[in-house]
Image: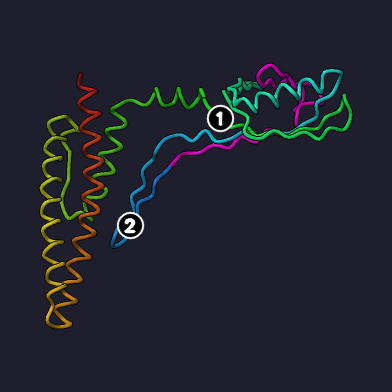
Amino acid sequence: MGQVVITLGGVTFQDFEVPQKIAVQGGQRVAVHPLIGGGQVVDMLGDDPGKISFSGIFSGADAASRAQILDAATAAGAQLALFWDSFFYTVMIEEFSVAYEKPWWIPFSLTCVVAVDPVAVIAAAVASLGDLVADDVASAVGLSGQAGMALSLGGGATVTALASAQNLVSAGLTVANSALSAGAASLTGAATAASGITGLTEVVASAGQLAALSSMSGYVNRAAMNAAVAAL
């Protein structure tokens, strides 16, 4: 990595101590909810900073002391600043191992868990409530077909419009619950195979509609809350 200098806590790696590569693992937390009858709802739960790992060799007269510093930080669960080039993180060392060969030559490897990723913090701060409302409304509208109702906010996702949408979804939930109960009663009380199949079909359809409406309710309620905050 050339002339790059890596610093972890109070320990600096430079020259040939710098590893050939630093593995940075991150992602987005997601929750996938399969829906009865097909399809799924995917909720984005936020940034997952992940882990950073690299290996190298402590060298020189202070090789052992620097290895001991990181060993102590690992045991203490200390939060340390890790930076190189234009990258900066606050991390905790999850795994740290050394292969002591000589007092002045100690290969090591470590894996850090990211406690704070400033880039992700900034990105979260930049995201406006309006964007969050729009995303939730889009998700709710996307479920309207499976929910069996038309949900449109053509006039804009205002507090008033979202309150009306909440009432509409709530009413749909009541109807879907009643239909599910009726289908279940028809299924359990079926006198013939044909009527049993009809009851089962009603249960499956109502359950799928109820699942979609429940997801819609979550999106619409969150959008309404964020829209109300944005209007303050």
Count the numbered circles shown. 2
Quadrant containing the N terminus is top right
Q: Which residue is painted at 49% across and 36% down in the image?
A: 48
Pick the front one: 17 or 95: 95
Q: Which of pointers 2 and 1 indicates the residue nearer the eye? A: 1
Q: Is residue 158 above or below residue 184?
A: above
Colouring scheme applied when the structure was drawn? rainbow
Q: Which residue is mark 1?
A: 114
- Amino acid type at circle 2 is Gly
Picture quarter containing residue 208?
bottom left
| Image: magenta residue range | 1-29
Task: Give neighbour class at mark 1: few <14, some 14-19, many 20+ (Cα, 10 Å).
Answer: many
Residue 68 percent across, percent down from the top left:
75, 23
Q: Which residue is mark 2?
A: 39
Picture quarter containing residue 66?
top right
Q: CA distance from mark 2 to mark 1?
A: 34 Å
